[in-house]
Image (spheres, rainbow, N blue to C red):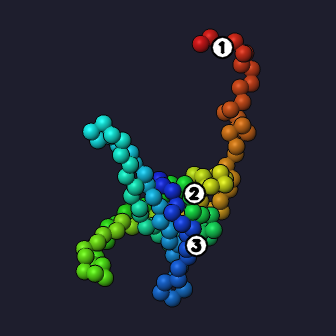
Amino acid sequence: MEITGRLTADAVVRKVSGERKVTVFSIAINDTYRSDGEQRKVTTFIDCSYWLNTGIAEYLKKGGWVQLYGRIGATAYLSGSGEATASLTFHAIEINLLGSPQRNESSYNASGHTPQELPKAEETAANKFVGIDDDLPF
């Protein structure tokens, strides 16, 4: 499954049983729709975990856009006041950084590659129109 959203806070690395560590963070997914001619906005918050490499935590900063691949789970429980409550949890196996508040773009995946800055649009060969005249037929 793939989901895309904005980080609601900086990621945190938590130590669990023994020496095992997990990177945890939360994302918000915004959706808009029309109802009775009025535009409405719905935000869904999803708690996420990444078990493969904690080095990604330093790149998961509040406000950044991320694309996640993995599986989703729902947890139902009783709150302290006895109310039935539920939460969504996403177990990520791949994280792609789409953009951050500083507009730096990079990618990080389950194979443990270090993030690398993507080439700027003006630097890519696809954006260089060599040999094309200024007089286009359309």
Classed neighbour count for the residue bearing mark 1: other residues with Cα under 10 Å, few (<14), some (14–19), many (≥20): few
- Asked whether, in this view, residue 89 is left or right of residue 58, the answer is left
Residue type at numbered disc 2: Gly
Q: Distance of mark 1 from mark 3, alpha carbons?
A: 51 Å
Q: Percent x, y for residue 86? A: 30, 69
What amino acid is labelled 3 in the image?
Answer: Thr
- According to the picture, the residue beneath numbered tag 1 turns out to be 136
Q: Name above or below for residue 104 compared with residue 81.
A: above
In the rendered view, tell whether residue 37 sits above or below residue 59. Answer: above
Label whose residue precedes the other's in the sequence (3 or 2): 3
Number of residues whose C-alpha sits closer than 10 Å to that of mark 2, classed few (under 14), some (14–19) or many (20 or more): many
Quadrant including the N terminus: bottom left
Q: Give the SS element for disc 3.
A: helix
Identified at 68% across, 32% down, the residue is 127
Percent x, y of residue 12: 55, 74
Q: Amino acid at mark 1?
A: Leu
The residue at the point 71 percent across, 19 percent down is 132
**In front of the other: 96 or 76:** 76
Element type where label 1 sits in the image: loop
Q: Looking at the rendered structure, which numbered label has been put on residue 64?
A: 2
Judging depth in this view, the residue of 63 and 114 nearest the camera is: 63
Q: CA distance from mark 3 to mark 2?
A: 17 Å
- Which of these two is toward me, 29 or 138? 29
Where is mark 3, residue-wise? 54
Q: Earlier in the sequence, mark 1 or mark 3?
A: 3
